Image (spheres, rainbow, N blue to C red):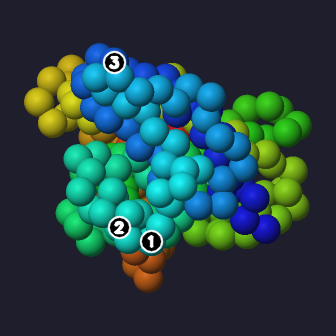
Amino acid sequence: YHNYRNNDINKLQLLSEYASETLGYDVIRVGSLTKNTISWERKGETNIIDYSNSKYLSPKNDIDIITCCEIFINGGGGPSALAIAAGRQIITINHLPIRYASREILKLWIPKLIINKETNEYLSLKNIEELGLATTHNGNDYLEKDLKIIENSENDILNIFLDYFKIKNNKLSNEEIDLINEYKLKRKATANNYANQFISDTEDTMAPSFLKSYPNLLK
């Protein structure tokens, strides 16, 4: 029933190569119970390392890597708790449900898209709430409503990474600022319905690039 949380590691290749080759970061994959190794691991002046499938995998090394990283790309699961505790900068991708997470997780985030199989159109945030899916952790709830979950594309993931640096360096355009403000207004309008959840106000920010790519989210 948690299959909706599964993510394809290869969708992070574009971000990883940009971070490594253009920005000079070392990129380290963390986590356990992986389905695939990555074919695009590389070593050089900067590295992309599949630590999750290496002989060095251990709880201590997990802690050291996550708590000492500069930016943590969160795709769900337990490792994010370490990043939060260590005060790391967090970018969240492929997040569901849309109304359940800590403020740290949703400081900059993008959700998976929820698609109506009959119309092949993605649901707006309002639609998701109206269908009672804003806090569900059961993948069967989507199946029962004839919906499918689409994970973020390589470009979606690269673009939220670029948004992070725009926000950090105060380089957002007026259009991007307007999209974020519109999003916050939409979230605030129904926040009182989720007072018992971790995130119930407008402190979270959905990536403006994602809002621009999928404008019907705000309908």
Up-down relation of residue 185 to residue 87 (above or below): above
User: In this figure, which residue is indicated by the disc labeled 2?
Assistant: 63
Q: Secondary structure at mark 1?
A: helix
Q: Where is residue 100 shown, x and y percent of the image? A: 49, 68
Which part of the image, by quadrant, shows the N terminus? bottom right
Cα separation, mark 1 vs mark 3, equals 29 Å
Q: Where is residue 62 shown, x and y percent of the image? A: 41, 63
Quadrant housing residue 168: top left
Of the pair 4 and 87, the residue shown nearer to us: 87
Q: Where is residue 151 shown, x and y percent of the image? A: 64, 40
The disc label shown at residue 59, or none: 1
Packing grade of label 2 (10 A; few <14, some 14-19, many >=20) is: some
Q: Secondary structure at mark 2?
A: helix
Q: Secondary structure at mark 3?
A: helix
Q: Is residue 74 visible?
A: yes
Up-down relation of residue 57 to residue 124 (above or below): below
The residue positioned 62% from the left and 28% from the top of the image is 39
- Amino acid, disc 1: Pro
Q: Earlier in the sequence, mark 3 or mark 2?
A: 3
Up-down relation of residue 19 to residue 192 (above or below): above
User: In this figure, which residue is indicated by the disc labeled 3?
Assistant: 21
Query: How many numbered discs sit on the rendered protein?
Result: 3
Q: Is residue 154 left or right of residue 65?
A: right
Packing grade of label 3 (10 A; few <14, some 14-19, many >=20) is: some
Q: Earlier in the sequence, mark 1 or mark 3?
A: 3
- Amino acid, disc 2: Ile
Q: Are the residues at dot 3 and dot 2 in contact (C-beta closer than 8 Å)?
A: no
Quadrant housing residue 166: top left
The residue positioned 87% from the left and 50% from the top of the image is 146
- Amino acid, disc 3: Glu
